[in-house]
Image (cartoon, grey):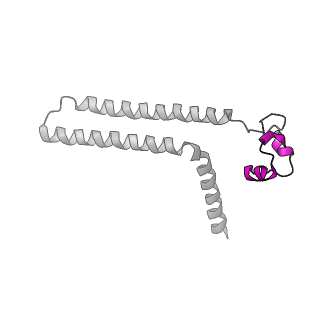
Amino acid sequence: MFKTLKSLGQTLLLIKFYNFIKPSLPGLGILFLAIVLILYAHSEYISWVEISGRKIFLGYSYLLKNILIIISIIAFYIYARRQKKISQKVEKITPEEEKYDGYDDLRKKEKLKTEYERILEGTDEKDNE
């Protein structure tokens, strides 16, 4: 019984965490890809240094890697804050019946007639009805 309650609690926590993260999932995906590409490029550079023996810029490569990762994280943080502000600014759009949209006359009619029905009746004018 305690195992099922524990697993249910964990499931609920995961669902809550997913709903919290859901708006920023595209940004997290881009952040993850950027970090993976930075790490891959750095590992390729280290492999090239081992083969060529040129260790002049090896220390700078670690510094550059870490700076690029920090810049990526800061860019994601700014993106996530902007998305949060934009989502807070969006308000619920409530329909206002008092606005004139040009179709009030049509709403008042019981039955609308097609152009062919008007021609057959002899009332070819559209706003004569």
- Residue shown at the point (18%, 40%) measured from the top left: 48
- Residue shown at the point (67%, 71%) measured from the top left: 1
Q: Quadrant of residue 7?
A: bottom right
- Residue shown at the point (81%, 44%) measured from the top left: 106
Q: How many marks?
A: 0
In this rendering, would 29 be left or right of 109? left
Q: Nearer the viewer, residue 12 or 88?
A: 88
In this rendering, would 67 be left or right of 46? right
Q: Is residue 81 above or below residue 106?
A: above
Q: Nearer the viewer, residue 63 or 22?
A: 22
Residue 39 lies in the magenta stretch: no
Q: Position of residue 75 (x, y in %)?
A: 47, 32
In this rendering, would 90 be left or right of 120? left
Q: Position of residue 97 (x, y in %)?
A: 83, 38
Name the quarter where the C terminus is drawn: top right
- Residue shown at the point (16%, 41%) measured from the top left: 50
Residue reaching furthest to the left: 52
In this rendering, would 35 be left or right of 6? left
Q: Position of residue 32 (x, y in %)?
A: 43, 44
Which contiguous range is marked in magenta?
106-129
Residue 107 lies in the magenta stretch: yes
> Can residue 21 be spotted in the picture?
no
Q: Nearer the viewer, residue 110 or 85?
A: 110
Residue reaching furthest to the bottom: 1
> Can residue 108 be spotted in the picture?
yes
Q: Quadrant of residue 59?
A: top left
Q: Nearer the viewer, residue 128 or 44?
A: 128
Q: Quadrant of residue 99?
A: top right
Q: Is residue 112 above or below residue 8?
A: above
